[in-house]
Amino acid sequence: MKGPWSSASIRVQLTGWYAIVLSLMLVAYAAATFFAVRQEFGEQLDDQLHDDFESAEGFLTPTPDGRVAMSGDRHHDPDNDEDRGSDVWSPNGEQIGRSGASAALPPVALATAGAQARYESIAAGGRPWRTLTGTTLVSGRSVVLRVARSEERLREQLSEVLKVLALGLPVVIALAGLGGYVLARRALAPIDHLAVEARRVTAERLHERVSVPNQHDEIGRLAAVINDAFARLESSFDKLRRFTADASHELRTPLAVIRGIGEAGLVETRTPAEYKEAIGSMLEEIDRLTTLVDTLLRLSHGDAGSVHLALEPLDLGQLTREAAASLAVLAEERRQRISIEAAERITVVADGLVLREAMTNVIDNAIKYSPVGATIAVAVCADGERAVVEVADQGPGIAAEHRERIFDRFFRVDTARSRDAGGTGLGLAIAKWAVEINGGSIRVDSAATGGSVFRISLPRGMA
Amino acid sequence: MRVLIVEDERKLAQALASALKGEHYDVVVASTGEDGFFRANAEAFDLVILDVMLPGRSGLEILQTLRQRHIDTPVLILTARDGVDDRVLGLDLGADDYLVKPFALPELLARIRALLRRGRPSEAFRLKAADLEMDLVGRRAVRGERLLDLTAREFELLEYLLRHQGHLVSREMLAREVWKEPRRATPLDNVIDVQMTRLRKKVDVDAADRLIHTVRGVGFVLREGEP
């Protein structure tokens, strides 16, 4: 489900949400203000009525005809006031005195006129009134006094307030929305900028980076993340480029040799022995080429994750001993010693054949690069939840800057080293591949002996 | 022994035919699936070498039809490197063996010998070539009057060479049959070469004629006289 704004820009969405939230808050605020004002005005009116009542009480004087006169108020002329009035009623419901605008009012409902003074809002003569009714004594005689004030002014004031609020609210909301839009635009401008910069970085210009204005704010962190992604992309592009270049070099070399031998063989007639020699030499190159292609194919299958592993619990020490034993003659030829220290019962769940291939390649590497008469120290031990195999050689060691790339396909520390001595250049790549598809990791460090130590780490499994 | 080769790749078919003729087989080449099926159906062969990837009628179809018609001639199929499924399917359909292209010729010849020998187990307990003799039961090997002091691996290696005497043996075959490694790898190739050098020293040292020969680019052969 897509929201109604899913196609709008974040800027518009932000502004919209901002305006909605702000409107709701303002409306609520305006309503609260209005009701507070109305309450306040009502209370003021009631206070005035109360004052009116008390002053009217003071002015009540009995007349000889049994009625009540209301006189002596110096502050206003009751007979000319259309907004105020008061009247006096006898307990039996007869109006016995009045002043001001009270003529418009209905008779006092005596039944409801108790001892307690009572406020009432009534409509009379087409106008709203507020009244206060109560009993009082005039010369010892109990009468009902009612004072009244028109509510019209109060209503006018309230509607004035309402008008101000109603007119002001849209303006304020519009201004707020505009402000929100400007704010959102300012806040998001660096992102647009970032997008423009990021778009500039293409496969051909992967070395470029987006600028990081302030690495501590959110945009800065985003820019840093994008740069990080570019860096990784660049490094894998470089890797791929290097691999393609190396692979074509490694594949072309045997092809060039085959071609050269073939062409040279055809130029002049040679003895059968020489022809045999030439053909054999070509076959050697073909063999090398076949191995190379097979290995690359396996590695690429591994890349695509389409390798079926025959997983089983394996004794890592046993496996390592087997791998070392299979290469023992190579070490013997170089009068080297392979010492194996393996802890008991270290089990991993892995594909034995594949894992042994990793061991074989790493140990073979150690034999190849250690000098004649050296000792190759192999240790199998547990490190918490990991099972670790360490192969330490006495070779020349690997410079720190090469350690990452030593497992790359075709990478050779010494590029001058000939193909014959260096093998296919895929041994350690195969080892890394074989370890990793079994859920492990491999790395290389400097050994205390001055050479390198290859460390294969695998998750320990249940026996 | 009549062998039918069904292979559309002309150069490969020719190379196979010439190699098999060199081994004194009677060879017929069919270059299409139709032709191959027709011949396999109509004529009697001791062995069929069948390429799986054929234009027209696929090798697997031919195999299936042959087996449905109860023609039980041993069939060796040739599959492409990635055709793992072809291989499994081929064996399910009644192929007797398979080889993955590109394969080494000695390997193919060894497979053919094995297929043609099938049903007739070699009950040899003693193997012999010139003055070299191996007693498989007593685990002894003698060259002339000299008892050879062989390691277990060297003994197996010599036994394998002797069983295939006169025939080329590739490193791939040695890796699989003697070292029991399903996959060939560079370290193993080096190990094989070293073992072979040691074995040759023990077998051929002080002897008038050498028995173990290296054939460059192909492998090794144990043979009397010229390599």
Image (cartoon, coloured by chain):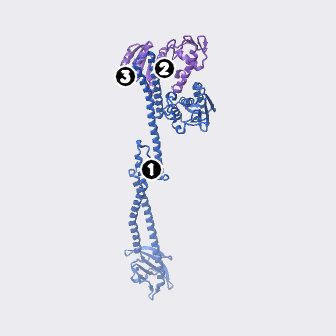
Chain colours: A blue, B purple
Residue shown at 59%/20% (left/top)? B152
Quadrant where the C terminus of chain A sits is: top right
Point out residue A434 in the picture as x, y percentages from the top left corner. 52, 32
Query: Mark 3: which secondary structure?
Result: loop
Chain under callout 2: B
Q: Which residue is mark 3?
A: B57
Q: Answer yes or no: do the residues labelled 1 and 2 have beta carbons within 8 Å?
A: no
Which residue extends farthest bottom?
Answer: A64
Amino acid type indicated by mark 1: Ser
Q: Is residue B30 above or below residue A21?
A: above
Point out residue A128 in the picture as x, y percentages from the top left corner. 40, 74
Residue A192 vs residue A363: left or right?
A: left
Point out residue A377 in the picture as x, y percentages from the top left corner. 61, 32
Q: Which residue is mark 2?
A: B216
Q: Is residue A237 above or below residue B92?
A: below
Nearer the observer, B89 or B157: B157
Tell me the crowding category of disc 2: few under 14, some 14 to 19, or many 20 or more residues within 10 angstroms, Cα based. Answer: some
Q: Is residue A400 above or below residue A65?
A: above
- Same chain under badges 3 and 2? The reply is yes
Chain under callout 3: B
Point out residue A133 in the picture as x, y percentages from the top left corner. 46, 77
Give the Cα distance between marks 1 and 2.
61 Å
Q: Determine which of the numbered discs, if any, sits on residue A211 in the image.
A: 1
Chain under callout 1: A
Nearer the observer, A144 or A279: A279
Give the Cα distance between marks 1 and 3.
63 Å
For the residues carrying marks 1 and 2, which lies nearer the camera in this image?
2
